Image: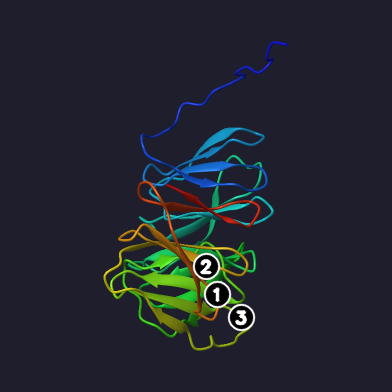
Amino acid sequence: DKSTLGVESSITPPAAETPSVLEVAGGPYLVYRNAGRIVRLGDPVATVAAGGPLATPVATSDGTLWVYRIDTGAVCELPRGAATPTCPAQLPAGHSGLLALADDRPVVLDVTADTLSPVSKDGLGEPVAIGVKLPATALVANTSVDGRLAVADPDRNQLHLIDTTGLGKDGRAGHPVSVDLPKDGRFSGPVATTHVVALVDETRNEVRTYDSHGTLKGTKKVPGGRPRLAHGQDDRVYVDS
């Protein structure tokens, strides 16, 4: 029998850059961070203007996409099926932020003030001091791991695991767990699942995995070119090389 597969429609990419891909209900989404454009490939298909350059996006399990505007400090959401983002939260002027999830809820890491705040439709919640000084080059994981959020410090080659259990409860964060990474390494990531956080050592073409206590669980050489990590909708980390 002849194949009945055929192209029903096509979308022209809104920018000549590699997008961040998020597999989530109502998606997948392609986020062109530099161009500030979001493409939803789910129903309804849409190309959405975010208004400016974006940090790495995150998406909750209900299909809501969250983005952070690098130029304005606005934290914006695009609910499943929506055509226009709304921006309920804002970092102070001059501050830099990164988005992540803690227990499937958006949080913003203020790398200028070294605080972590929950985000809701009413704005930013009470900030919690994270207990460690971060550089502007800090990299945050997509989601928390057993009550801790992984943050990589590429300047000092350290991995910090920040307590998130006090967020939104008027509590203080517990002491962070800090792990020294190989001093001659160059790292990207981190990407997390429910119980494990992974980083890429680009110097060795190696994936390193840790638990929420900072214990090294394993290392794996990756053949081919520079590995990239991605978080799948099945809560697994995938390696593209």
Q: The residue under label 3 is which amino acid type? A: Thr
Q: Secondary structure at mark 1?
A: loop
Q: The residue under label 2 is which amino acid type? A: Val
Relative horizontal placement of residue 192, taking residue 61 as reference (left or right) = left
**Could you tell me which residue is drawn at 32 percent across and 66 percent down?**
137
Q: Label 3 neighbourhood size at 10 Å, few (<14), some (14-19), many (20+)?
A: some
- The tag earlier along the polypeptide, 1 or 2, is 2
Q: Nearer the viewer, mark 1 or mark 3?
A: 1
Q: Position of residue 111 (x, y in %)?
A: 38, 72
Q: Position of residue 45 (x, y in %)?
A: 61, 32
**Could you tell me which residue is drawn at 67 percent across and 47 percent down?**
25
Q: Position of residue 53 (x, y in %)?
A: 38, 49
Q: The residue under label 1 is which amino acid type? A: Asp
81 or 124, which is in the foreground? 81
Relative horizontal placement of residue 96, taking residue 50 as reference (left or right) = left
- The tag earlier along the polypeptide, 3 or 2, is 3
217 versus 33 height, above or below: below
What is the CA distance from the residue labelled 3 to the residue labelled 2? 17 Å
9 versus 136 height, above or below: above
What is the CA distance from the residue labelled 1 to the residue labelled 3? 16 Å
Q: Is residue 127 visible in the rendered structure shown here?
A: no
Relative horizontal placement of residue 165, taking residue 158 as reference (left or right) = right
Q: Is residue 45 visible in the rendered structure shown here?
A: yes
| Disc 3: which residue | 165
Q: Secondary structure at mark 2?
A: strand
| Disc 2: which residue | 197
39 or 141, which is in the foreground? 141
| Disc 1: which residue | 211
Report the quarter where the N terminus lies: top right
Q: Nearer the viewer, mark 3 or mark 2?
A: 2
What is the CA distance from the residue labelled 1 to the residue labelled 2? 6 Å
Q: Label 2 neighbourhood size at 10 Å, few (<14), some (14-19), many (20+)?
A: many
